[in-house]
């Protein structure tokens, strides 16, 4: 077990393509760190550089107290799980799991004992004599995990290990991998494009875009307090509703934002908790509203928050809740790179992406398609971003 | 009911024609082999008496035993085996290394591959003259080992080319997994890549072996002493007797069968290994 430290690590390919630029990231001993981002963001390249499968153009990578820049993969004391598992097709399950031990000159009976242990831990006892070709996807995935844990390395690297499984198995293996990691307690760097996987598995999550690290934090902090439009839009499912709006501040007390033709009042504490908003007085901002911060206007409460009127486009009753897709009459603010990533995850009906917004209502909602409704906005939990550079506006 | 009627028309003239054509092709290609085997089982007297029937009158293995007792056919067989096996081993070893490099490293392998193919198909007789002069200069003549080098000129390019194509199909993830698991590049090659490319390795080995085993032109040009002859070369001498006008074709044919057997067995055995789909299960 050891901590991992990436210091200004960059990867530039000979043709000038910058895959990763100036990535600085420290992973604590025993931590489960998830690298997440849309495809092509450099997360896999970053992982491969830690593995030693990709040369580093500049910067330093330390595993434990060793600088590993020049070390071959075999000398880094790491184990890796590949997206397609990369099991050795000519070897049995037992030989696959035992291969790293064999390469490290572990005695035969010791190998047999440890392979047995790993196979038991992963529920593969019955399959040790099979070849990978005779296994199902989930079983192959487990063998790949077994091959990783058997050597008790100081670092696990996982490159989208669940992306080839079907949805149900993916959810199951998600829990299994996380449980396994907690059990063996080995520092883990896990790459995925799936923000749900990132949120549910990671102790901390590093969001990457276009070779740059956008933000590193715990899943909840990323969700509650995104540093940038990109993180705000990428993390969360259904994703944050983002609109371009104009900010008006009257005096110092309260203000409002203009969303299309509608005005949304902002109480004083919204402005005081985000002093940076003063600089955007009379200027456009991007406002972000999480679907759960929009609730159904019931005509009774007159408490906090403003109200918006919207037309209902679609109601998806999920049993535990209903997702209400609506149109505010304002185009949603497109964040480069997130749209496709979000659609990839299949959370948004493609014909709705780009026009409306989503609200999370209770399961018993009576809202009907085609009607106009009032939405109560939890203004205290609004997010504000600079439309030019996409940074969050706070102080 | 058109569907039923079509089924009743079985086997259909197209199908009959197809199998007839297959039969003709089989007969044309197998008949010479049959005739060799038949002749090799005849006595000299029967052979001289002329052929009256498709089947031999009665079978004798005397030609086979004589090939070893009177003509010492074992020696050339051993020579051929040494040469062919050595050629095969060297071809597969270096072909693997070169093919792997071309499949994985960022080298412009296109022109190299073209050159390799052209070299592999260079006319044999065009090579005999220059190589003879070169070998005479080097003192390589009348020795079996230089023949190995000669055959490599042909087998190594073919093996390299074949293996390169097989390696290129193997996902790089497999070796990378081996690298991370603790292997060096070379160890990953021998422990993972080559075993996964077994169909390719077998194909390359068999082609190399057959080429070296069957060669006549080079052996005829470079060898003089009968004890150093390869099997194909020895077969020619095998038919000669004291009587200059009599050629023992039946003994020649016995030797031909002996020489052909290893190749036929090799291909039959390897056929099972040359099944594709061996990579099934590596991925996904």
Image (cartoon, rainbow, N blue to C red):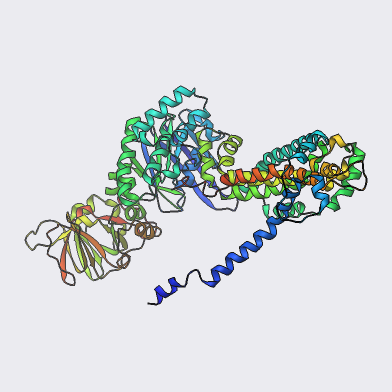
Q: Position of residue B154 (x, y in %)?
A: 76, 48
Q: Residue at x 57, y 34 (%)?
A: A70
Q: Is residue A28 above or below residue B272?
A: above
Residue B70: x and y in percent read: 83, 35
Residue positioned most to the left: A300
Question: From where the camera sits, is residue A1 visible?
Answer: no
Q: Is residue A308 visible?
A: yes
Q: Residue at x 54, y 41 (%)?
A: B175
Residue B195 position, x and y percent, is 57, 40
Given residues B39 and A123, the one toward you in this image is B39
Q: How many marks?
A: 0
Direction from residue A320 to residue B141 in the image, left or right: right
Which one is in front, B258 or B134?
B258
Q: Position of residue B237 (x, y in %)?
A: 86, 42
The extreme bottom residue here reads: B1
Along the line of sight, the residue nearer the viewer: A83 or A343: A83
Give residue A71's quadrant in the image.
top right
The quarter in which the N terminus of chain A is drawn is top left
Query: Is residue A287 shown above or below B139?
Result: below
Q: Nearer the viewer, residue A390 or B243?
A: B243
Give the side of residue A350 with respect to residue A53, left or right. left
Q: Is residue B164 above or below residue B3?
A: above
Q: Quadrant of residue B184?
A: top right
Looking at the rendering, which quadrant does residue A288 occupy? bottom left
């Amino acid at each position: 077990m050891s901590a991992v430290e990436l210091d200004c690590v960059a990867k530039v390919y000979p043709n000038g393509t910058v895959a990763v630029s100036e990535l600085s990231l420290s992973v604590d001993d025993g931590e489960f760190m998830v690298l997440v981002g849309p495809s092509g963001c450099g997360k896999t390249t970053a992982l491969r550089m830690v593995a030693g499968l990709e040369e580093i153009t500049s910067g330093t990578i330390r595993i434990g107290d060793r600088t590993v820049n020049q070390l071959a993969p075999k000398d880094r004391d790491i184990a890796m799980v590949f997206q397609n598992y990369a099991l050795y097709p000519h070897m049995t399950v037992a030989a696959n799991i035992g291969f790293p031990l064999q390469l490290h000159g572990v005695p035969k009976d010791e190998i047999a004992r440890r392979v047995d242990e790993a196979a038991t831990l992963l529920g593969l006892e019955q399959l040790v004599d099979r070849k990978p070709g005779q296994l199902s996807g989930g079983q192959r995935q487990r063998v790949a995990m077994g091959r990783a844990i058997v050597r008790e390395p100081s670092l696990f690297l996982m490159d989208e290990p669940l992306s080839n499984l079907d949805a149900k198995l993916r959810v199951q293996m998600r829990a299994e991998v996380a449980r396994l990691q907690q059990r063996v307690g080995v520092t883990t760097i896990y790459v995925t494009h799936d923000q749900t996987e990132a949120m549910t598995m990671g102790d901390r999550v590093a969001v990457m875009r276009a070779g740059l690290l956008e933000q590193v934090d715990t899943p909840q902090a990323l969700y509650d307090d995104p540093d940038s439009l990109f993180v705000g839009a990428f993390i969360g499912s259904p994703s944050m509703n983002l609109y371009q709006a104009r900010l008006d501040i009257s005096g110092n007390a309260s203000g409002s934002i203009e969303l299309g033709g509608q005005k949304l009042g902002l109480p004083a504490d919204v402005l005081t908790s985000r002093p940076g908003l003063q600089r955007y007085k009379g200027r456009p901002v991007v406002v972000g509203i999480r679907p759960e911060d929009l609730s159904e206007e019931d005509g009774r409460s007159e408490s906090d928050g403003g109200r918006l009127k919207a037309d209902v486009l679609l109601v998806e009753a999920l049993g535990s809740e209903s997702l209400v897709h609506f149109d505010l009459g304002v185009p949603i603010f497109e964040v480069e790179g997130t749209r496709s990533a979000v659609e990839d995850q299949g959370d948004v009906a493609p014909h709705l992406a780009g026009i409306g917004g989503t609200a999370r209502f209770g399961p018993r909602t009576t809202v009907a398609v085609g009607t106009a409704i009032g939405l109560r906005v939890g203004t205290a939990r609004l997010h504000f971003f600079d439309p030019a550079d996409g940074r969050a506006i706070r102080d | 009911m058109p569907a039923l009627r079509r089924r009743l028309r079985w086997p259909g003239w197209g199908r009959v024609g197809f199998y007839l054509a297959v039969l003709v092709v089989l007969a044309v290609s197998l008949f010479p082999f049959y005739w060799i085997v038949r002749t090799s089982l005849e006595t000299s007297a029967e052979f001289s008496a002329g052929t009256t029937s498709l089947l031999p009158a009665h079978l004798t293995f005397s030609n086979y035993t004589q090939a070893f007792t009177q003509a010492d056919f074992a020696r050339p067989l051993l020579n051929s085996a040494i040469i062919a096996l050595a050629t095969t081993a060297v071809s597969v070893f270096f072909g693997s290394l070169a093919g792997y490099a071309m499949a994985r490293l960022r080298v412009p392998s296109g022109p190299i591959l073209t050159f390799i193919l052209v070299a592999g198909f260079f006319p044999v007789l065009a090579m005999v003259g220059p190589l003879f002069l070169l070998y005479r200069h080097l003192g390589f003549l009348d020795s079996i080992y230089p023949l190995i080098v000669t055959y490599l000129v042909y087998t190594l390019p073919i093996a390299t080319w074949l293996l390169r194509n097989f390696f290129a199909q193997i996902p790089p993830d497999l070796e990378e997994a081996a690298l991370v698991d603790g292997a060096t590049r070379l160890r990953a090659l021998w422990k993972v890549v080559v075993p996964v490319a077994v169909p390719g390795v077998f194909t390359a080995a068999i082609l190399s072996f057959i080429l070296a085993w069957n060669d006549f032109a080079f052996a005829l040009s470079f060898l003089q002493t009968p004890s150093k002859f390869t099997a194909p070369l020895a077969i020619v001498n095998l038919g000669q007797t004291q009587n200059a006008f009599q050629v023992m074709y039946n003994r020649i044919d016995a030797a031909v069968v002996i020489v052909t057997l290893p190749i036929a067995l090799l291909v039959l055995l390897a056929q099972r290994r040359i099944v594709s789909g061996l990579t099934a299960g590596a991925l996904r």
